[in-house]
Amino acid sequence: MRDTLVLNASFEPLSTVTLNRAVVLVLTDKAVVEQAHPELRMRGAEVDIPAPRVIRLCRYVRVPFRRQAPWSRRGVLVRDRHKCAYCGRRATTVDHVVPRAQGGADAWLNTVASCAEDNHRKADRTPEQAGMPLLRQPFEPTPQDAMLLALGRDDFDALPEWLAQPAA
Ligand SMILES: [Zn+2]
């Protein structure tokens, strides 16, 4: 799927998002389409719009590109796309890789999204101690993650699949 360029309200390029996320931003009045794909449309029961190639946010967002985004639980879930770091299922909690009981910090590189079950099972142990290897290592949030956090919405993947069909 092609990515869509996101401009700030001031027309500065900010980041790219997937086409689906771009459409959700437009449908929720968070952004307007500045440029559309000539041949691709997003069609649904109540929607028929040209697939956006460039969108512009309606409201100016301050995105910390250089400075680190402040750590937050919601931020960890956004960064990890709500996928459990241990089993890949939907995550609703945040796990400390090195547990707080062992001195682990509230930090991007020490926290991962986790399903409640795995979080409970791992308890106050490291992945090695629990025999629960991480499917991927935690990382600093990307500018795209920082932008999504700044927009105050993280449920961009809720778009029905039929909406992302190329025009017939
Ligand atoms: Zn899990």
Image (tube, rainbow, N blue to C red):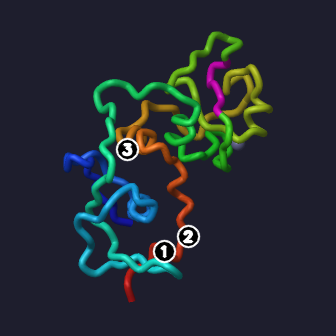
* Residue identifier under label 2: 160
Mark 1 residue crowding within 10 angstroms, few (<14) / some (14–19) / many (20+) = some
* Residue identifier under label 3: 144
| Image quadrant in which you'd find residue 121 | top right
CA distance for labels 3 and 2: 22 Å
Which residue occupies 66% across, 16% down?
100
- Which quadrant is the N terminus positioned in? bottom left
Q: Element type at marker 2? A: loop
| Image quadrant in which you'd find residue 148 | top left
Q: Element type at marker 1? A: helix
* Residue identifier under label 1: 163
Residue 19's spot in the image, x, y percent? Answer: 39, 64
Total marks in image: 3
Q: Amino acid at mark 2?
A: Pro
| Sooner in the amino-acid sequence: mark 3 or mark 2 | 3
Residue 114's spot in the image, x, y percent? Answer: 66, 38
